[in-house]
Image: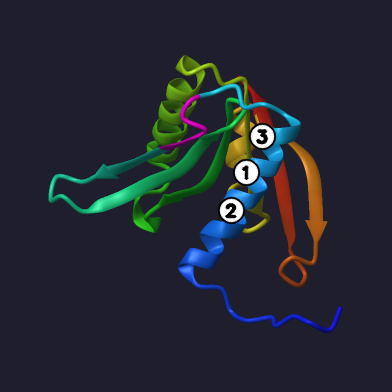
Amino acid sequence: MNNFVIEESTREGCQVVDNGIVEYNYSKVPFTQEPSFLPINRVIKNLEGDIIAGINSVLYCWNCLYIDVLWVKEDSRKDGYGSALLNEVEKIAKEKGCELVHLDTFDFQAKDFYLKHGYEVFGVLDDCPSEHKRYYMKKNI
């Protein structure tokens, strides 16, 4: 096994790897949605047109929603924007047949926010980053 080279991936290389795992997954468990990956991303803008909050998520393969990022500008927190965005993507996902949402968050981010919205912790990664916890959460909708 000495006949190989490890190098930094190009954008094309990353796509080959992504496509490879998608094809493998499909060969083991057929996908239940079309398209296989559907981004559900939303932003909230203030009256000046500035983005003050946003959510990036994807409904993938088996009608599961993964929330990658939910962000609210610091001076706009506690105004309900995060809840509005979360409710919006959950509603869209549910309309498309989704029954499971999952995400991860850190102890210094929004664990309590998600708990208030019906999410539950199913895993914890300690010391990620050092002296902090990363929480893996899910919700059936």
- Which of the 4 image quarters holds residue 79? top left
The residue segment tinted magenta is: 34-39
Residue beneath label 1, please?
22
Q: Position of residue 124 (x, y in %)?
A: 80, 50
Say few, some or many: other residues with alpha carbon within 10 Å of mark 1 (under 14 / 14 to 19 / 20 or more). Answer: some
List the single residue furthest toward the left.
48
The amino acid marked with disc number 3 is Tyr
Q: Residue at x 50, y 39 (%)?
A: 58
Q: Residue at x 15, y 50 (%)?
A: 49
Up/down of 36 relative to 93, above or below: below
The amino acid marked with disc number 1 is Val
Q: Earlier in the sequence, mark 3 or mark 2?
A: 2
- Give whichever of 20, 103 is nearer the camera: 20
Q: Are marks 3 and 1 in contact (CB under 8 Å)?
A: yes
The amino acid marked with disc number 2 is Asp
Label 3: element kind:
helix
Say few, some or many: other residues with alpha carbon within 10 Å of mark 2 (under 14 / 14 to 19 / 20 or more). Answer: few
Say few, some or many: other residues with alpha carbon within 10 Å of mark 3 (under 14 / 14 to 19 / 20 or more). Answer: some
Residue beneath label 2, please?
18
